[in-house]
Amino acid sequence: MNFLFCGDHNAERGVLIAVLSLLKAERGEEVHVYILTMRAKSKSRSFKPFSQHAADFIRSLIVADNPNSSLELIDCTENFIKEPPTANMGTRFTPYAMLRLFADELPQIPDRILYLDDDVIIRRPVDQFYTQDLTGTELVGVLDYFGRFFFHNQKKIFDYLNSGVLLLNMPEIKRTGLFKRVRHLMQVKKMFLPDQTAINKLAKEKRIAPRKYNEQYALQDDTVIQHFTTSFRFFPYFRTQTVKPWDVKRVHSVLNLHEYDDLLNEYLQLKDQL
């Protein structure tokens, strides 16, 4: 199975946790991980790329689990310079979210790959989701928990996908030019959550998967992938809530979540080696 992550050095902790959860869920299966990064800066921020040291360390864990597995760190700096998301660079949007949109230009990327944000935990094997028939489908994702109520692009009542977990059919994406068109739209039109909005607007061959493959609100009995997104909470008062897996104390104190204690204890023992 093939997995795709993107990010700068701040993604290293999350990718480590996600990979540890993947190895635990898949139990010795052959996996191939691709991490896209770049060197970048904006008027107000500078970014450090995902480090080669962190990639090498995570690779060592993957190969120890299965010698046939692999990890490849890919520098997309030149791709980004050629096609920057010009209209959205002054927003809260992080340019690293765009890196997955260059997957169609990278010969290393296989035909079928599961993209994951760096704030996910894989709780159960993903093979049933990963191996589904993708004929005539560009990508498969799960409805955005809150965004489905506010955003709409097609004739279905709910059709707005969360882009944090996406099964990508690269040959079909190349045939339709989906990512190329998304990159262009991000250059010329300012949008809210620009990468996710553009994907939803332009993907015509998308499939909606059950919530269990991208649980964005609270752990359920059947959850396969839990995604620690920013969410709205209404009691005892309205507020937004953000808790990430690497903030272990708040996973316990705010979410009262102990499902992943073994995994997170392993992370705490390893994180200083990144």
Image (tube, helix red, strand yellow):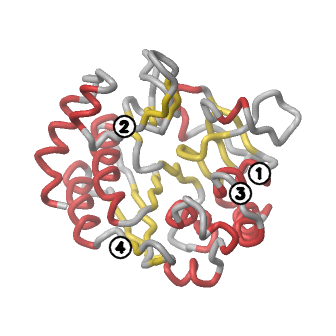
| Label 4 or label 3, whichever comes before in sequence order | 4
Asked if residue 136 lies left or right of residue 225, the reply is right
Foreground mark, 3 or 1, reads 3
Image disc number at residue 243: 2
Looking at the image, residue 107 lies above or below residue 122 = below
Q: Nearer the viewer, residue 131 or 20?
A: 20
Residue topped by disc 1 = 203
- Residue at far front of view: 237
Residue topped by disc 3 = 191
Q: Are marks 1 and 2 in contact (CB under 8 Å)?
A: no
Residue topped by disc 4 = 48
Q: Are marks 3 and 1 in contact (CB under 8 Å)?
A: no
Where is residue 228, by image quadrant? top left
Label 2 packing within 10 angstroms: few (<14), some (14-19), many (20+): some
Type of the residue with mark 3: Met
Asked if residue 74 lies left or right of residue 267, the reply is right
Q: CA distance from mark 4 to mark 2?
A: 23 Å
Q: CA distance from mark 4 to mark 3?
A: 25 Å
